[in-house]
Amino acid sequence: MIKGFHIFLIFVTTVLLISCSKKEDIIPYNEAPFILNVPAGFPNPIIPNDNTLNKYRVDLGRKLFYDPILSRDSSISCATCHLQEKAFTDGKILSNGVQGGITERNTPNITNIAYHNAFFWDGGNHSLELQVIGPIESVNEMNLTIPEAIERLKEHNTYPNLFKLAYGLNEPNIYGLTRALASFERTLISGNSPYDKYTSQGQSNALTSNELNGKNLFFSATLKCAECHTGFNFTSLAYENNGIYLNYADDGRGRVTLNTADNGKFKVPSLRNIEVTGPYMHDGSFNTLEDVIDHYAQGGKGNVNQSPKIGGFTITNQEKQDLIAFLKSLTDQEFLENPNFKSPY
Amino acid sequence: MKHYFTIIILSLLILTTYSCKKEEGCTDPAAINFNPEAEKNDGSCLYNTTPAETGTFKLSFEAQTSNGQNLVFNQPYVDSLGYTIQIEGFKFYISNLTLVKTNNQEIKIKDVDLINFKVAGENYTDAKILIGDYKAIKFGIGVDSVLNHIDPSQYPNNHPLSLYQNTYWNWSTQYRFLMLEGRADTVIGSSSNINQLLIYHTGLDNLYREYQKNVTFSIGLNAIYEEKLIIDINQIFYGTFGNIDLKTESFTHATTNYNVALKATENLKTAIK
């Protein structure tokens, strides 16, 4: 009888102990920290407080980035136009969307996009998270409304669980979709080119004499390349009219600001991995780096909004080759082959 | 020995029961002594005032095409210039719905709502309001500059600003304020070729407009007061700010053909009666 009472007491105590324990947060965010590989000489990128990186978020973003589920006919993914081996561009003048759609502009290089403060060639969006919506909904790109995309993700075998792990969501939603893709994109950091090894890693033999000569030209007051392509990421992030046309078909930044003084201005692109991101300019109108240098040497077509920084210069053939050699020293082979950025499928 | 064991178990039981007793307090977030830790309401809630005495204010809109005819979607009609047109979509945002009391006190009753003429039951907005005498209705046409720049991914699906409303452009413009769509035959007097697409999507902070109607009314306890505003679509095309030429100004996306968006914006403001 007493033994039975003991068992009863132990049982009651156990039940009480279990029932009054606080609800545990079962989402193991902190068990999956993500260490962002910030190269020497680079600052830490600004990451929104509501989207700090963790492994689940980056992994989910990577899966979504490579998954054609986000296009209307499930034929293309983000990676169709953003190919790793081309520093997340596609080598085309304009890019192909679903059902014969063609983009209005050249696919931008998203290398080091974590360091940008505005997105698209015209900076018409200020959040990497919200930028995600653009290509998915654009009729010329993936042509899927966000609610349609969410429905597909909800019905998927694995995504609901991945959204729960990454963001604690009961089901996939817009918040998680935009944040996961941004999380993966923030990891696409390139800073281990020969130029970086020379500049930030103390490897004085990382650049050849031709490349060093090209570097001097690049930063010279004559060529003024670095007045726009400045800093660790080789961009001022400003909007400039570089005078490739007398009359622009695309108003660029002017479409955003509705200020005619901004017509023909586009965001200065980063030159990192420029060797593999051609064709160049917002409309892919220049095939080679030689074409680009020739354009700047000629001093532009004289558009009314042309940047005063573009005034032309003389350059010998050898100097041009050296300058190109320097630009190619910005190619980060490790980045282009990094297994963490490849398709997870 | 057995006694010691019993005592230990009993002590543990008492301790456990005591320590896990639910915290009692006021569980009503509306109370001034709300205790977020409390799990059980002990009846101690205190309130600033007695619950307000309210009624309901309902603001409804009716769209008309010409000569006072009610809008019927996808049904061609002849407009005042003789063009045959049909309207296929008509919605717009209102923000900061505010009622002005006769003592000039202004009471905001709604942040934002989407008025959609095409969906039954979405051509109005309503809200609870203190009983009393009122003399004016104010609201913004469009989404005000604060709401226009809030991250849209945070709203529940049925919120008027949710991406599920399909009213948001993530590029530059943010929310479309007015969305008026249809088709027209651009030959006056002809109705055999109604295929010119008409798309008037306004937006941008500087096309937000404030509207006011002075009207006296009273809100009674638990009563519903409805104010019905009529919008003459003809006046959106051909309004006080100038005519929109359906042939050469058949569309605007606010940033594209801004001047057409400006005309539609100003005309809409004066088309609401």
Image (tube, rainbow, N blue to C red):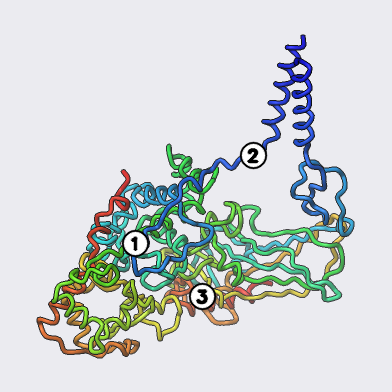
Chain under numbered label 2: A
Cβ atoms under marks 3 and 1 closer than 8 Å = no
Which residue is at the front of the view, A179 or B130?
Answer: A179
Image position of A320 (left or right of A70): left
In the picture of the structure, the residue carrying the numbered disc 3 is: B261
Q: Earlier in the sequence, mark 2 or mark 1?
A: 2
Label 2 secondary element: loop
On the image, which quarter does residue A19 sit in?
top right
Which residue is at the front of the view, B212 or A197?
Answer: A197
On the image, which quarter does residue B247 sit in?
bottom left
In the picture of the structure, the residue carrying the numbered disc 2 is: A23
Q: Residues within 10 Å of mark 3 (few under 14, many from 20)?
A: many
Mark 3: amino acid: Ala
User: Going by the picture, which residue comes out furthest to the right?
Assistant: B50
Asked whether residue B231 appears in the rendered view, the answer is: yes
Image position of B66 (left or right of B251): right
Q: Position of residue A195 (x, y in %)?
A: 24, 70
Share a chain, discs 2 and 1? yes
Q: Position of residue A291 (x, y in %)?
A: 17, 77
Chain under numbered label 1: A
- Cα separation, mark 2 vs mark 1, equals 39 Å
Label 3 secondary element: helix
User: Going by the picture, which residue comes out furthest to the top?
Assistant: A1
Q: Residues within 10 Å of mark 1 (few under 14, many from 20)?
A: many
Residue at screen point 51% across, 47% down:
A29
Image position of B122 (left or right of B108): left
Q: Residues within 10 Å of mark 2 (few under 14, many from 20)?
A: few
Chain under numbered label 3: B
Q: Is A227 rendered above or below residue A173? A: below
Label 1 secondary element: loop
- Cα separation, mark 3 vs mark 1, equals 41 Å
